């Protein structure tokens, strides 16, 4: 197994180095200093800023610096261009926890609920329960995320408990600590879960239904296994590959947070920070965040491969 | 065996359990703050970018900096039109007869806030030291320091004797030195002279009247050198000033908390007010020591809905009414609060902004074939377009009728703004008969012979609809346009490169003087400068150079009007409009007289009853 992991890691090193080079190149197509100073900048202002941010260095030097920062996860000397006096390391440290406080519980809740509903739906395939669940899933996924956010915030954070003088969910804001989590984070988590469930349920049901037509299911039936055992022991295990794939591909996005939720619920997470940085052409923040995102994406791909190998040993052999 | 069926009781239980759980973490909107008076105020953005005055440029930077830092002059809180008064000075600066030398005397009772930057073996508490004249000179010199990415040099450029040359020389030496020990501030600026511990004088290059307004701008706030050097690159996050509040907590993109500065110098609530102010109870705290509140919390909102809901929940003490909530809150016909809002005790404050929203023409004949130039044909074509445009319809359709539509480029409330918002010199639409006549005289009867005109507009929420309305209004006299929607940066680029023959644009005054808007038509300011119209008129330029050095007077006002009418006759633009920002205050908020022309007014605010979140 370790050889397998090492091999995967080594395969991905050049991929990541290439991504970093592409990222740096793409961000320099339009001169970032001109973007900050506007057109026709004073040449001395231009030079001063170029030196200050190290953009006067050769590309290779800047590349090694960025790579070193990512490898050591040390961004304490990378200064934001639009938040004077603030460094990217601090921005990362401050924003990653609020993002994860929303996305991780939402992913867990969504996965558990969606898989459970998909199993129930597949169990009652073609019957009213299945049809009702699928109609609900389609309706759920047909409505825009923004609608859920706006109405969820209005009804549950603003109206709910208004008469009693109590507020069950915060309209916006974030406080760290487990005791504060339900007040500030539960509503965004529930909204996120509700939206994602429609897509996931339909996908997982399709996987389950496909598995239910396989020969091993017929064999299990012939051997007299109960329907519950067939569903939970045989079918679920064999459906794990697509389930793992789906969950793992969402992992990197967890770190980047949910932009809409963070913006509407005033949660100072990474999605909001990155969005603001892109809007304001905060070059170092965009470069660092995207570099980290790419690294996480590659790591999650490797993790997915490892999990495949664990679930299905044939993967290792191939 | 029969399975138990879900009963009504278990269904109710299923509903009650989450509610009971929710009750465990439920709380009153906002934590109680005890006896402290805590103001919760909104910032409609992710927050300020910098709390270093010379690096700040946005309204949000201004809002936050104005709590911590102070300027030599400030605007009188209750006076409208705006009037200046001394803040850090003992009296208004004395100006010599030629208008060139300004003499200042600082108050001797102003101290910087207590901060670690002042700590020493003799001063373990870090008590802030007294502010002296050298601090003012140092703070202003920082405007010239390129190494700190200052954004506000333009405020003093070509204004103070020898300052521009000093800047060039010091920057060149700094570049050459490449040495961290190089002291940028070591030499003197000829036009900035310290004459005593608390006195100094400034010699101007010419008697520029706007200098008084510049002295009230937050970028010229006074900072202590110790703090700048102690915090280095972190200084924008650690403001150290002499203002009524000190920054105690800054949560990026979420909130900024300011506490009362215990070392704040004596400063009192105004003792002059109008009858209208008295009706609103703005006189009740007259003569009281400032600041009136113990804490100010700025809450940052990128979206309007959470801000509005927080205001309606009582978390915020005031809010601007978002456009989509305007008709819910305000009766458009009577322009008053709707009953359900009035019953909550909310107060309504429409605040006109110093706006100049217009459609501009590129008057440069070389780059604008049909609309450019000052031939009879070009001028009449522009006048016809102006007469065909109905700004009132735009106002009603897109701004809830809230904007002020006016003639000229000088916003309401400033000298040079036409009485009743109208002047006969303007080609104010809609007057389609006259527009058709002028179009025919221009050589394009019913638009024949005139190609489709490119109309550049920035992409925003309703820019597509706005451009459609423009298309329809101009089509009524036979003029066809091709709306080109661009990102704002691209629009600026097109205007600067003179490729936009007709464009939609806006200008917000930097200071409350019509001179600021008249400068937009001054020949030397042509694109890529702020004269986006590339307007050229030798007589106008001569008059502008004259008014620039004049102090406020009836003679100057008359010249403003003359210059305004010159541009209107040439129809270099169509317009204009000024937005109104609609503020609502809670019933518990006292002394609320909002303005967006200056931002140090939270020091005058207080609450009837201490309430609201403490942090």
Image (cartoon, coloured by chain):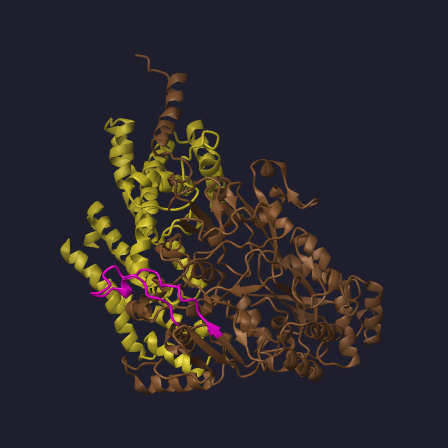
Chain colours: A yellow, B brown
The percent position of residue B422, horizontal first and vertical second, equals: 75, 63
> For the magenta stretch, what is the residue range?
B104-132
Look at the image and say whether residue B113 sits in the magenta stretch: yes
The percent position of residue B525, horizontal first and vertical second, equals: 60, 79
The percent position of residue B33, horizontal first and vertical second, equals: 38, 41
- The picture quadrant where one finds residue A220 is top left
Inspect this view and state whether residue B407 appears: yes
Inspect this view and state whether residue A219 appears: no
Residue B163 higher or lower than B56, as above or below: below
Identify the residue at horizontal 72%, vertical 57% (top origin): B392
Horizontal arrangement in the rendering, residue B278 relative to residue A135 (left or right): right
Horizontal arrangement in the rendering, residue B153 relative to residue A246 (left or right): right
Residue B36 or A109: which is nearer the viewer? B36
Identify the residue at horizontal 61%, vertical 78% (top origin): B548
Look at the image and say whether residue B451 sits in the magenta stretch: no
- The picture quadrant where one finds residue B483 is bottom right
Residue A167 higher or lower than B326, as above or below: above
The percent position of residue B7, horizontal first and vertical second, equals: 39, 16
Identify the residue at horizontal 46%, vertical 57% (top origin): B267
Residue B268 or B529: which is nearer the viewer? B268
Residue farthest left in this picture: A2
Residue A281 or B48: which is nearer the viewer? B48
Residue A254 or B244: which is nearer the viewer? B244
The mark total stands at 0
Q: Quadrant of the N terminus of chain B?
A: top left
């Amino acid at each position: 197994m370790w050889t397998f992991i090492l091999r995967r890691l080594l395969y991905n090193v050049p991929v990541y180095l290439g991504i970093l080079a592409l990222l740096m190149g793409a961000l320099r197509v339009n001169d970032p200093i001109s973007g900050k100073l506007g057109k026709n900048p004073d040449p001395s202002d231009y030079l001063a800023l170029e030196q200050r941010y190290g953009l006067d260095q050769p590309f290779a030097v800047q590349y090694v610096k960025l790579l070193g920062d990512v490898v050591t996860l040390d961004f304490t000397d990378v200064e934001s261009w639009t938040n004077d006096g603030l460094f990217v390391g601090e921005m990362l440290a401050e924003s990653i926890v609020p993002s994860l406080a929303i996305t991780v519980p939402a992913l867990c809740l969504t996965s558990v609920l969606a898989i459970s509903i998909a199993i129930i739906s597949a169990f009652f395939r073609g019957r009213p329960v299945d049809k009702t669940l699928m109609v609900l899933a389609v309706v759920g996924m047909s409505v825009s995320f923004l609608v859920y956010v706006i109405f969820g915030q209005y009804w549950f954070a603003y109206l709910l408990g208004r008469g009693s003088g109590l507020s069950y969910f915060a309209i916006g804001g974030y406080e760290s600590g487990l005791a504060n989590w339900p007040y500030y984070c539960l509503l965004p988590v529930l909204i996120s879960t509700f939206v994602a469930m429609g897509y996931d349920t339909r996908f997982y049901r399709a996987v389950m239904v496909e598995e239910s037509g396989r020969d091993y299911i017929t064999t299990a039936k012939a051997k007299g296994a109960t329907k519950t055992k067939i569903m939970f022991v045989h079918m679920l295990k064999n459906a794990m590959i697509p389930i793992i794939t789906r969950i793992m591909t969402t992992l990197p996005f967890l770190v980047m947070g949910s932009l809409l939720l963070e913006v509407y619920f005033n949660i100072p997470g990474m999605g909001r920070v990155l969005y603001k940085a892109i809007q304001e052409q905060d070059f170092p923040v965009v470069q660092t965040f995207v570099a980290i995102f790419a690294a996480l994406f590659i790591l999650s791909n490797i993790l997915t491969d490892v999990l495949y190998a664990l679930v299905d040993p044939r993967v290792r052999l191939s | 065996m029969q399975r138990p069926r879900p009963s009504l009781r278990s269904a109710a239980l299923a509903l009650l359990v989450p509610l009971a759980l929710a009750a465990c973490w439920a709380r009153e909107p906002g934590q109680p703050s005890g006896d402290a008076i805590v103001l919760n105020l909104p910032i409609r953005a992710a927050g300020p970018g910098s709390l270093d005055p010379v690096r700040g440029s946005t309204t949000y930077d201004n809002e936050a900096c104005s709590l911590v830092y102070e300027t030599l002059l400030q605007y009188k809180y209750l006076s409208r039109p705006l009037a200046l008064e001394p803040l850090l000075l003992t009296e208004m600066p004395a100006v010599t007869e030629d208008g060139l030398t300004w003499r200042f005397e600082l108050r001797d009772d102003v101290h910087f806030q207590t901060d670690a930057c002042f700590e020493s073996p003799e001063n373990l508490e870090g008590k802030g030291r007294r502010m002296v004249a050298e601090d003012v000179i140092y703070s202003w010199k920082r405007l010239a320091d390129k190494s700190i990415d200052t954004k506000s040099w333009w405020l003093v450029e070509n204004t103070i004797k020898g300052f521009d040359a000093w800047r060039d020389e010091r920057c060149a030496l700094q570049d050459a030195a490449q040495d961290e020990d190089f002291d940028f501030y070591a030499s003197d600026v000829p036009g900035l002279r310290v004459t005593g511990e608390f006195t100094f004088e400034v010699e101007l290059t010419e008697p520029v009247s706007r200098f008084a307004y510049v002295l009230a701008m937050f970028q010229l706030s006074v900072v202590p050198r110790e703090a700048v050097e102690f915090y280095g690159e972190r200084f924008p996050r650690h403001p150290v000033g002499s203002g009524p509040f000190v920054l105690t907590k800054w949560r990026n993109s979420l909130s900024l908390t300011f506490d009362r500065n215990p070392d704040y110098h004596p400063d009192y609530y105004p003792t002059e007010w109008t009858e209208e102010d008295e009706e609103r109870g703005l006189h009740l705290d007259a003569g009281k020591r400032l600041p009136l509140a113990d804490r100010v919390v700025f809450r940052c909102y990128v979206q309007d809905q959470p801000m509005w809901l927080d205001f309606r929940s009582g978390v915020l003490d005031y809010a601007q009414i978002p456009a989509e909530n305007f008709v819910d809150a305000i009766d458009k016909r009577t322009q008053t609060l709707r009953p359900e809002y009035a019953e909550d005790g909310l107060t309504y404050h429409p605040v006109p902004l110093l706006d100049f929203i217009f459609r501009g023409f590129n008057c440069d004949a070389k780059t604008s074939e049909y609309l450019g130039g000052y031939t009879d044909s070009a001028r009449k074509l522009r006048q016809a377009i102006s007469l065909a445009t109905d700004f009132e319809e735009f106002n009603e359709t897109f701004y809830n009728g809230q904007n002020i539509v006016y003639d000229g480029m000088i916003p309401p409330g400033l000298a040079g703004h036409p009485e009743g918002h109208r002047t006969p010199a303007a080609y104010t639409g809609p007057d389609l008969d006259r527009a058709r006549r002028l179009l025919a005289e221009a050589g394009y009867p019913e638009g024949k012979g005139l190609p489709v005109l490119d109309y550049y507009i920035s992409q925003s929420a309703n820019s597509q609809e706005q451009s459609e309305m423009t298309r329809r209004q101009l089509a009524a006299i036979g003029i066809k346009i091709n709306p080109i929607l661009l990102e704002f940066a691209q629009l600026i680029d097109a205007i600067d490169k003179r490729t936009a023959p007709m464009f939609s644009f806006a200008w917000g005054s930097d200071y409350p003087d019509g001179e600021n808007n008249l400068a937009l038509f001054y020949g030397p300011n042509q694109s890529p400068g702020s004269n986006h119209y590339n307007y050229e008129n030798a007589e106008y330029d001569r008059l502008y150079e004259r008014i620039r050095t004049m102090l406020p007077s009836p003679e100057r006002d008359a010249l403003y009007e003359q210059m305004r009418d010159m541009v209107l006759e040439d129809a270099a633009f169509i317009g204009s409009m000024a937005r109104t920002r609609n503020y609502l205050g809670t019933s518990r908020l006292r002394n609320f007289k909002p303005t967006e022309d200056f931002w140090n007014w939270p020091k005058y605010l207080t609450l009837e009853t201490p309430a609201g979140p403490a942090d």
